[in-house]
Image (cartoon, coloured by chain):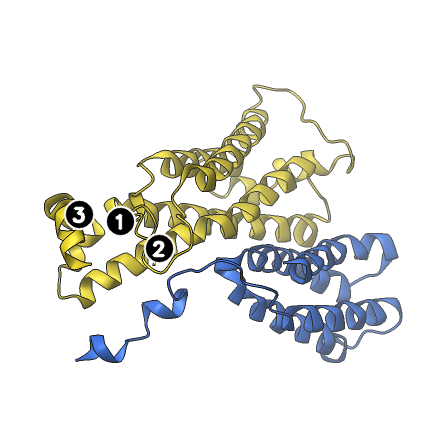
Amino acid sequence: MNHDSDIPPGWSYNPASWSQRLPIIALAVVGFVIAAYLALYQIRVFPTVWEPFFGQGSIIVLNSEVSRLLPVSDGALGAFGYLADAIAGAVGGKRRWKTMPWMVILFGLFIGPLGGISVLLVILQPVLYDSWCTLCMVTALISVVMIGPAMDEVLASLQHVVRERRAGRSLWRAFWGLSEQSHGGQMLAARR
Amino acid sequence: MWPHLLCTAIGAWLMAAPDLLDYRDPARTNDHIVGPLLFTFACTAAFQSTRGLRFVDLMLGIWLLIAPLVFGYWGEPLINSLACGLGVVVLSLIRGPITVQLGGGWPALWRTEPAERA
């Protein structure tokens, strides 16, 4: 067993290390920039939108009824989602899988549904409008690629919370990382 | 990892195939729906901690094999659906190497060890 306390018990690496998280944060930032561009087109800050492959596709998709179902456009919602991903990915140190499980789980909740909505929108483009939007698909690709690498950290946090509960300690305190703050390293060392 | 990346490529192909092979509904809509779903689950299953999602790919592969029967389409979309379905079924059954340890993985969340049950 690895005695480095940064690494979750039974793991061969730390899923909350910066080398694991930085690529996801970088992807989220790129997604944010593209989605913000699309949102700015949707409110006509930009008069046209870049579309290299599908002719009028982006214009049809970005002005469709689906894109205006909510009070904010789907582009704006996406931009907010990627920003939330980037922030939730960046907050906390490399031990956050046990010091901030709530943040890691929130991160997973941002990544998962955002990916789901992106895929739904990609399905609706051809099915409802028989059109494709290149940049929309690029952002969807980013959402999808982020899911796999983000979920290992969520798993480590869930395992930590479950382990604390099975040891008879408060699930609530473990979820908010309070047990780690109060017990500190000594308690952990004693447990080993 | 590579079997799942190949499944991802099949998902992308299914998104493009209705236009490239120029076939109509119902195969068109079916592939436009299955393609992105397959792409998403296969891409996620390529990562070791979420490798279990390959079984969703397996379901989608089986669906591609039976969809032509359910909706009754023939010719190119039938051959395409069967070829893609067969490929996805075979590829999703290959787990691929797991080179990292994940503390027991997702089953550790609901599996109770005998010592802990006491």
Determine the secondary structure under disc 2: helix
Is the C-beta separation of discs 1 and 2 under 8 Å? yes
Packing grade of label 1 (10 A; few <14, some 14-19, many >=20) is many
Could one spot residue A71 in this view of the protein?
no
| Lower position in the chain sequence, tag 3 or tag 1 | 1
For the N terminus of chain A, which image quadrant? bottom left
Residue bearing mark 2: A156
Q: Earlier in the sequence, mark 1 or mark 2?
A: 1
Q: Residue A29 got which mark?
A: none
**Which residue lies under the disc numbered 3?**
A180
A13 relative position to A189: left or right: right
Q: CA distance from mark 1 to mark 2?
A: 8 Å
Q: Secondary structure at mark 3?
A: helix
Question: In this rendering, is residue B79 above or below A184?
Answer: below
Q: Which mark is residue A98?
A: 1
SS under mark 1: helix
Q: Earlier in the sequence, mark 2 or mark 3?
A: 2
Q: Give x and y (percent) for residue A144.
A: 56, 48
Badge 2 amino acid = Ala
Tell me residue B14's x, y (percent).
74, 58
Task: Characterize the local packing of mark 2: few (<14), some (14-19) or many (20 or more) Cα atoms within 10 angstroms.
Answer: many
In the rendered image, residue A126, in percent from the top left (x then y), is placed at: 70, 51
* Colour of chain B in the rendered structure image: blue
Q: Please tell me which residue is depicted at 13% across the width and 52% down the height of the picture.
A: A187
User: Is A67 on the left-hand or right-hand side of B101?
Assistant: right
* B39 relative to B49 in the view: left or right: right
